[in-house]
Amino acid sequence: MTIEIIIPNFNGHNLIKKNLPEILDVISGYKNVSLTLVDDGSEYNDFSNVRNFIENIKNKYNIEIKIFRHDKNKGFSYAVNKGVFASKAELVVLLNTDVVPQKKFLDPVLKHFSKEKDLFGVGCMDKSIEEGDVVLRGRGIGVWEKGFLTHLKGDIDKSTTLWVAGGSSTIRRDLFIKLGGFDVLYSPFYWEDIDLSYRAQKMGYKLIFEKDSVVVHKHEEGSIKGHYSSFEIKTIAYRNQFIFVWKNITDTDFLVSHIVWLPYYFIVSALRFDTAFYKGFFLALAKFPGIILKRLKQQKLYLLKDKEVLEQFVLLANKCA
């Protein structure tokens, strides 16, 4: 199988210099692997540093390296889509700039894709370095409660997962394109990988979490925390939760519960002076026509109900509560 590594970058030349050689060392052990870096409108000096660094090291590796650049910052979804849609590979590996795969991380992934013809994506075991500690992440579960989809960290001893992460997963390129890629409604960040994974499952495709496909997530200060305030991040997270529900949830009782619970959230947010919630809601509302157009188009392709997608995680989510 042909494979392409897709790495989006925004003002991350320090991370590229630190992590790209390790990534190239790992993937050089595989055949038919190439790498694409999509610069999402970085400052010119930052982009020049990245481009020059790649020019200086690429001859050390027998790997094709391509670079694309946006003239302005568009957001994570746009950057990843650019790389995937330009690729000719059968599989695309999505990596963030602060994520480094470990040796042989593709071995179990390739086995899954060779066996499972309806497999959409495989998520990696994410050894997340957080304040000096290593937290094992990568498997997500979810439950519908109080009018929203609540997503949770899942135990790593299971292979089911509600989504595969946009910064540490392998996806079939043809299916990524069939589903339209990451939805840019969520730009600049958050929820686009959950959205894509959820749509894939409602269309009948499978997701797998593979604990033996290991990446190290170094959690340096990335482009989000380095360029957005905590209020802006919180607002975008709220906005995208609303977009997800309005765009993807089709079970009638789920939609009714969403409407019934909204007054509660408005009251609680007012009491807590949580203005980010209100701003997030109205920002989502401004996108409502586009959300509905995509909803109408997508739901024609769905084979499963929301309950059927989420029922495998209900008991596990209750244990985590």
Image: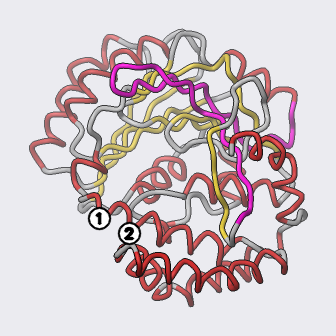
Determine the residue located farthest toward the front in the rendered image.
Answer: 271
Q: Residue at x 80, y 40 (%)?
A: 119
Residue 217's place in the image compared with 241, above or below, is: above
Estimate the spatial distance between the alpha carbons at disc 1 and disc 2, rounded to whole Å. Answer: 6 Å
Q: Residue at x 49, y 20 (%)?
A: 101
Q: Amino acid at mark 1?
A: Phe
Q: At which x and y percent is residue 224?
A: 31, 51
Residue 49's place in the image compared with 63, above or below, is: below
Q: At which x and y percent is residue 152?
A: 63, 45
Residue holding disc 2? 235
Return the mark for residue 231.
Answer: 1
Question: Which stretch appears magenta?
Answer: 116-145
Horizontal side, residue 272 vs residue 123: left or right = left
Which quadrant is the N terminus positioned in? top right
Q: Residue at x 87, y 53 (%)?
A: 311
Horizontal side, residue 166 vs residue 315: left or right = left
Q: At which x and y percent is residue 231?
A: 29, 64
Q: At which x and y percent is residue 52?
A: 17, 30
